[in-house]
Image: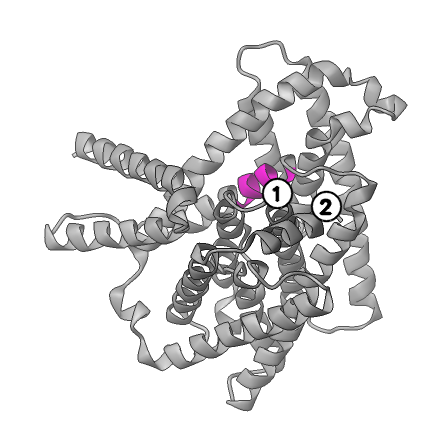
Amino acid sequence: MTTLIIITICTLLLVAYVFDLTSSRTKIPSVILLLLLGWIVRQVSDMMKFHIPDLTPLLPVLGTIGLILIVLEGSLELELDKSKAPLIRKSFVVALLPMLGLAFGMAFLFQYFGQGSFKNNLINAIPLCVISSAIAIPSVKSLSAGVKEFVIYESSLSDIIGVLFFNFIALNETFGFASFEHFVLELLIMIVISFAATIGLSLLLNKIDHHIKFAPIILLIILIYSVSKIYHLPALIFILLFGLFLGNLDELKRFKWIRKLKAEELDKEVHKFKDLSNEATFLVRALFFLLFGYLIETKEILNAETIVWAIGVVAGIFALRAIQLKLSKLPLKPLLFISPRGLITILLFLAIEPAQNIPIVNKSLIIQVIILTAFIMMIGIMAPSSPQTEEKDDTEGHA
């Protein structure tokens, strides 16, 4: 049985690698294929009557590690200079405003249909409002540099804002000056921790002479994130800042304290670290979506009671996104379609306390929204773009 498990896992990961290799040509997001493959494995194992233990507890573990690595991978690729300020501002606005509008809109609808208190409605709505960087970032690899850069910023910021918003609503009994003061204090504490940890990890990366040097760094990153989460601090800010710091050493060399880190030598190590983090991200992301696909029940996809809600939620997502893109003077194509829900949606949904759950927001609704947004993104990416549109996208990305 052990040999069979090893063969199965290796085969599935190799197939996942083929999906990743071919996604730029087929324009089909590898995530959709991974979910489908996981679901097929479940059907085959049920048909063959294999006894497989409950793997559900593994999902949040893989999801959390995957989220850390995906945000790290994306932030390592981003260039940070003054010319990027308009792009970052637009990314922040496009990530924030539709999320708030959709969350409060859905909460009012849930309230209208008698589903619990407004606070609980809002807590249940937030997971459906966050763009998944785990799906968005890998899906735009074949698009123009401008689009890719915007999506990395927007989806990473959406993850961070979504987690902050969720924790703020879920962890506060009342909402007044004291709760906002506490929230700002947590942000400031996390920023200080992020800077201190970034410098410390950079020194370690530069000073470790042992042949094993990158694994401890990744483990420390996950450890700092996890400890920060225990105290409900916005830990993704640390991941984003650490990645931006390492990815922009050339831009930061003008600062005297950066030169003390021997930036030239550190830059060589960063390239190796990027390669390792890319490999680790692929493995964890593939395992997460294969497992999630495996855990999907067919009846949950075809649940008629939630499909109307799912279509309504998806319609709201893209309507608000279209309005915000127009107001921000950004091209609708292909950005309108790149608004998938995925890993972060699942993690936030699983983080809802049982007492705060409402009946309408269940596993079926989450799965249907994830699948619908992924298919819409696939169609949007597959549709041919005119050269003018691609040129405009690239210009917007470097504005």
Residue 250 locus on image (x, y percent): 76, 25
For the N terminus, the quadrant is top left
Q: Which residues are magenta?
A: 67-75
In the picture, the disc for residue 398 is 2
In the picture, the disc for residue 79 is none
Q: Residues within 10 Å of mark 1 (few under 14, many from 20)?
A: some
Could one spot residue 235 in this view of the protein?
no
Q: Amino acid at mark 2?
A: His
151 w.r.t. 299: above or below: above
Q: Residue extending furthest front?
A: 387
* Dot 1 and dot 2 residues touching (CB under 8 Å): yes
Q: Determine whether the residue tagged by mark 1 lies in a helix, strand or loop.
A: helix
Location of residue 359 (image quadrant): bottom left
Magenta region's main secondary structure?
helix
Q: Amino acid at mark 1?
A: Ala
Q: Residue at x 16, y 51 (%)?
A: 44
Give 393 or 106, whichever is nearer the viewer: 393
Residue located beneath label 1 in the image: 145
In the image, taking residue 237 as reference, residue 255 lies left or right, namely: right
